Image: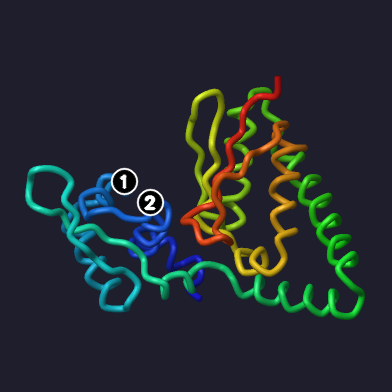
């Protein structure tokens, strides 16, 4: 796994942006990252050489096809996940020794502590302000995440999650973010996509409570 210095580099920023966007051309990346197209292409060549990105021709209109880039499965190893594997192993041992209710109690405790931490940072008067604060908090924890307006509210997009492997084996893991959104942001989220289910992101729709 690369450390924070990699993600601060141009290559790391490109990888993070591709994780957020799923696919993009060199021009798209240059515009998003405020870099020249040539600088981006040079880094993409290196990333492709290392097996971290792949390219394909996509027709965007009547013009000739555009080369778009996306991350390979190998690139997933760049993002935090080792502690997720360890947590899965610990939870498996707890379940085998003490039964499923013990695992449920662990996730209840994790959720309560996560809500306590979130409440110290997520306290803006407006819904969008609280979602922005939650987004910043998650980014500080290493999650590639953003939010967008939707009809009647906002959608939170988690493009990475260090606990995806945990959630596949222990779906209770997702209780944590659900409770944080419910109790700190102040709305019941509707999760429409899940990384653990094979989607490209975890997507939570949030609307003001009536």
Q: Position of residue 206 (x, y in %)?
A: 61, 33
Q: Nearer the viewer, residue 162 or 188?
A: 188
Q: Does residue 144 appear left or right of residue 166 in this picture?
A: left
Q: Evaluate if marks 1 and 2 touch, with contact meaning CB atoms under 8 Å apart.
A: yes
Tell me where residue 68 sits by quadrant.
bottom left
At horizontal 61% and vertical 50% (from top left) the residue drawn is 138
Mark 2 residue crowding within 10 angstroms, few (<14) / some (14–19) / many (20+): some
Give left or right: position of 77 versus 210. left
**209 up-or-down from 182: above or below:** above
In x, y percent, where is residue 49?
A: 26, 78
Left or right: 115, with 76 as reference point? right
**Mark 1 or 2, which is nearer the eye?**
2
Q: Name the residue under label 2.
A: 21
Instruction: From the image, tell me which residue sits under label 1.
Output: 32
Spot the residue most to the top: 210
25 lies above or below 116: below
Report helix, strand or loop for mark 1: helix
Q: Eyeballing the image, is 12 above or below 174?
A: below
Query: Is residue 186 toward the left or the right of residue 160 in the image?
Result: right
x, y percentage for residue 34? 28, 46
Label 2 sits on a secondary structure element that is: helix
Quarter location, residue 208: top right
Work out how far the residue at label 1 is from the one at label 2, CA to CA, in angstroms: 10 Å
Q: Which residue is drawn at 54% across and 37% down?
A: 155
Which residue, as the protein is rendered here, is positioned at the far right? 98
């Amino acid at each position: 796994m690369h450390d924070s210095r990699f993600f601060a580099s141009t290559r790391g920023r490109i990888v993070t942006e591709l994780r957020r966007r799923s696919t993009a051309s060199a021009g798209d990346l240059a515009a998003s990252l405020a870099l020249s197209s040539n600088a981006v292409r040079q880094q993409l060549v290196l990333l492709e050489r290392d097996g971290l990105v792949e390219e394909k021709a996509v027709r965007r209109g009547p013009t000739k096809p555009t080369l778009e880039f996306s991350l390979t499965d190998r690139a997933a190893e760049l993002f935090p996940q080792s502690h997720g594997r360890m947590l899965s192993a610990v939870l498996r041992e707890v379940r085998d020794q003490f039964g499923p209710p013990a695992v449920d109690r662990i996730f209840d405790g994790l959720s309560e502590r996560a809500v306590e931490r979130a409440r110290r940072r997520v306290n803006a008067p407006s819904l969008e302000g609280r979602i922005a604060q939650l987004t910043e908090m998650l980014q500080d924890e290493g999650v590639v995440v953003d939010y967008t307006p939707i009809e009647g509210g906002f959608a939170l997009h988690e493009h990475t999650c260090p606990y995806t492997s945990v959630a596949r084996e222990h779906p209770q893991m997702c209780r944590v973010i659900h409770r944080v959104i419910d109790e700190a942001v102040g709305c019941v989220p509707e999760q429409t996509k899940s990384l653990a289910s094979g989607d490209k992101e975890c997507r939570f729709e949030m609307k003001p409570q009536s």
